[in-house]
Image (cartoon, rainbow, N blue to C red):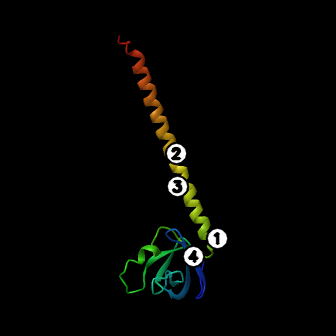
Amino acid sequence: MKYNIGDKLYKNGFMCYLEYEIIGIREYKDNITYEAKCLSCTHGYKCKVLLCQTGGKLEFAGMIDPYDDGQHYSHNMEGYYYKTLEGAKKARLQTLVSEKKKLIEDFQKRLKEEEKRLFELQDALSLVKDAK
């Protein structure tokens, strides 16, 4: 997918959604990278990021800003940049559903292990003669 200057992008941030605007395009022989400004930043300036396309999806490639104040963390979080806010929300919800399924799977495995231990203890208890 090709993007244009002025296009909006959205990304899952930490407990929020971040909005970006494409402000530059760098075309190379083999690929295209995009410069985007974070419209959601409220810390004194709007961060600028460099995005690359991998497998048709946009992902973080680096910070354009010369500042070294740790702001890159919000922009470099796991995940892709989406053309719509709904796309970002759907991706986040899919991730949460997958995480919950894994958590439930882990709990079920742990429950089976604990039930096995319980049965072993009950068997051991049944072998102990009453002490009077």
Q: Which of marks 3 and 4 is nearer the N terminus?
A: 4
Name the secondary structure under disc 2.
Answer: helix
Name the secondary structure under disc 4.
Answer: strand
Placement of 121 over or under 34, stated as above or below: above
Residue 63 rendering spot, x and y as whole percentages: 42, 81
Residue 9 rendering spot, x and y as whole percentages: 58, 78
Q: Which mark is residue 105?
A: 2
**Residue nearer the viewer, 105 or 69:** 69
Which residue type does callout 3 highlight? Glu
Q: How far apart are marks 3 and 1 (CA)?
A: 20 Å
Q: How far apart are marks 4 and 2 (CA)?
A: 31 Å
Name the secondary structure under disc 3.
Answer: helix
Q: Which of marks 2 and 1 is nearer the N terminus?
A: 1
Residue displayed at 60% across by 67% down:
89
Q: Residue 99 carries which label?
A: 3
* Residue that carries the numbered disc 1 in the rendered image: 86
**Residue nearer the viewer, 10 or 122:** 122
Q: How crowded is mark 3: few (under 14 residues within 10 Å), some or many (20 or more)?
A: few
Q: Do the residues labelled 3 and 2 touch (CB within 8 Å)?
A: no
**Quarter of the image containing the C terminus?**
top left
